[in-house]
Amino acid sequence: MKKLLLLVAMVATFIGMSAQNPYAYKLSASDKSDDGLTIHYTLNAAAQAVQIQLFDGETAVKAIDMDAELLTAGDHEFVINFADYPEIPTGKAISWKVAVTGEAITSPVELTDKVLKFYSPAGVAVDVNPESKNFGTMYVTESYASASSTYYTATVNGSVGIGLYQFDPQFNGIRNENGTYGFSCGMQSAGTTLVDWRPARIQISEDGRMFILSQRVNTGYPLYEINRETLQATPLFEGTLDTSTGIVTNGDVQVAAGVGVAFDVIGKGEDLKLMMMTCTPGTTTVPANYKTNEYNLGTATTWGEAPSRNFTAFDGKAINYASINLAYDGAGGIWMSQWRGAPTEGEPSYAYANLENDELELLVTDIYSRNGGMAFNKDHTLMVRGEGYSKKLVVYSVDNGELTKLYEYSCPSFTGWNHFAFDYANNIIACDNSAEVFGMVQLPNDAVVATPCTEEYYFELPATEPEHAYYLIGAFNGWDQDNMVPFVENNGVYTLTYNFGGEFKVKDEAGNWWGGGVTLTEENPSVTLVAGNNLNLDQVAEYTLTIENGVLTVTGFPEPQAVEYSDFFICGTFNGWNQENGLVELVANEDGTEYSGNIDLEANAEFKIITHNLAGGWKWFGGVDENNLGHFLINNDVLNTQISLVDGANFMVEEGGNYAITIKQTSTKAVAEPLVMVMTKTATAITTIGSDIKSDNAWYNLSGIRFESMPAAPGIYIHNGKKVIIK
């Protein structure tokens, strides 16, 4: 589908000095203990607000606002005392982020105080992967050198001349092992007997692999991978190099088709792909000599076979050897740009092609491009490129590959744009061979920029463990604190063996009650003790309980037996979930296979069926909540049908009214789950029958049928205007 170039949404003409969009880097933690830890972070620029955000998995736990002195550019540390933040769960791996808010601006602005002079800069890149040791580092290449002291890269200024230069996110130069600036990457520059080294375009993959194009060089390989630790360059393509053409062959296979012109990478790991344009011979400007190949590189560090495919969409369209860029758009397409003062369909300034079918879909001939700069940000939601004669860079928002123009901006220090890159906060760094500069442009950015720490710096509060001896208490002894059963301690491990069942808790000598709100089973016999709901054992048996490091483990589960239920009740919002008062009892039939009763419920009322089991504990039954709503909805679809009773969500009635509820069992009272419930909605509410019938000593059931004397069948009846339950 053709990419749309939509109308500009904002034209920015402001020129001046501002602060780059801030973000945090160099995240680490130190001094970890059971009481706390120290968190470290560095800001590339001053911030308006900074938060340390704590997470338990995907769940936000706590956001801690930093004071004003921790918002300046530079290194900071903050001590987290666990006692100050009871929200932090124990026994969990806690991850954290540093979320930064910058000063709001309404239009792009060049940071004129960050502009540096490079004689022939050709490529820029930023490591935007927070997992990387080099996160935030900015890179720029010097492809030719000058001895003039006006240039940052001159040897008289303590630099290496031609090479790769590194800067931290605050624009401080990073020195090499000799204490000077710049890295030759083990390569020799022009005029030596080894290789003509002209580092140009740089790309860093999602998983941190760095590649550098050696542009306009016949006597060196066209593309190199840079070891991020040693900064040594290794040719990517294996084979014999023809130093007259730049072509690399391996046996009968042509690996690379000539001198490096432009390239881009996309994906990571096994899915890493590389698209590269070459030209041969290197001195010609004949479009037919430009070839574009894609390599399914994956995790391979060298490539010695034919390209994965020849990409022909740009054949015959490239001509400006010195200023061409390729850029994957992340949505199934790829762009080509080149320096064109008077673009035509044969020599476009920009072209777009579909990766799937290798078809050219768009040629841009109405926009002049000076030096051909173009790039996407890390998630392919922004695109920047140079357009026009007036030093302009233009920024587009990107939605599934479609472009909408956001900003046009003319920079005071730049003439054109050879290469762009975005940093983690969507600041744009750029280089310009014509104006001989390397610098940064700040974009409006309303978003909070959150940098996650690496897993190395997660922390964990020790699981809460009672400091004193433990005791067993529960339904088996009527919750009598004077008759608790003590655990026996042995080297920090507490055990007891006791015959009991039902609901229980563990109590310590300090008066703390420890539970967990679960039923322990042979399949799930352990629980971390917390100050929570009761624990439960469904059957009475001789169990062995062990507590170690705050974790209770139960052994000795008997063979599964039928559970005897003594009675059934309805408990819910209508009585405030009070299991002692206001319960509605269901009445058993003669053989004890069914329990029935009626209840008036308002719309959206919630309830559960509860019972005492043989072990003496309460058992709460609900429904299976398939939609994660917190309730099982009783509506016309489930009325008059059998609903399984399980240890699940609450029941909720969709409509108010009087409901008849029947619990069905097997032929004996000693039964195992599941039980089933059938609900029907009565035609006439009890209150209506009671108010309409005179006190004539007659009896009426809930359907309004009259009995002259007390009915023999059990159920709920109205007699003299009052509800009577016959058992």
Image (spheres, rainbow, N blue to C red):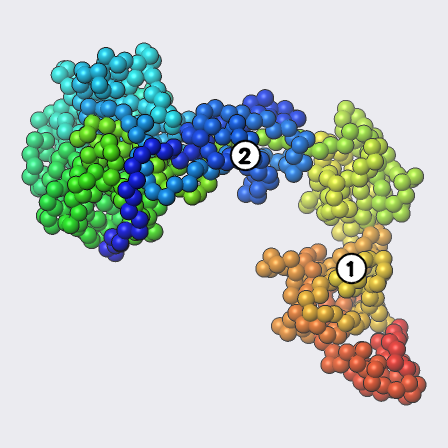
- Image coords of residue 432 (percent x, y): 21, 31
| Residue beneath disc 2 | 52
Residue 282 higher or lower than 156, as above or below: below
Residue 605 got which mark?
Answer: none
Horizontal relation, residue 529 to residue 507: left or right: left
Residue 58 vs residue 161, the one in the foreground: 161
Residue 400 seen in render: yes
> Quadrant of residue 704 in the image?
bottom right
Residue 167 vs residue 7, the one in the foreground: 7
Residue 476 vs residue 399, the one in the foreground: 399
Residue 535 vs residue 240, the one in the foreground: 535
Q: Which of labels 1 and 2 is toward the front?
A: 2
Dot 2 falls on a residue whose secondary structure is strand
- Image coords of residue 601 (percent x, y): 74, 70
Query: Which sits earlier in the primary sequence, circle 1 or circle 2?
Result: 2
Give the quarter of the figure containing the N terminus. bottom left
Label 2 is placed on what type of residue? Ile
> Quadrant of residue 164 in the image?
top left
In whole angstroms, how far apart are the C-alphas of marks 1 and 2?
A: 40 Å
Residue 374 seen in render: no
At horizontal 34% and vertical 36% (from top left) the residue drawn is 442
Dot 1 falls on a residue whose secondary structure is loop
Could you classify mark 2 by the number of other residues whose Cα lies within 10 Å: few (under 14), some (14-19), or many (20 or more)?
A: many
At horizontal 88% and vertical 87% (from top left) the residue drawn is 694
Horizontal relation, residue 381 to residue 436: left or right: right
Residue 258 higher or lower than 693, as above or below: above
Residue 567 higher or lower than 50, as above or below: below
| Residue beneath disc 1 | 576
> Quadrant of residue 291 in the image?
top left
- Image coords of residue 709 (percent x, y): 92, 85
Label 1 is placed on what type of residue? Gly
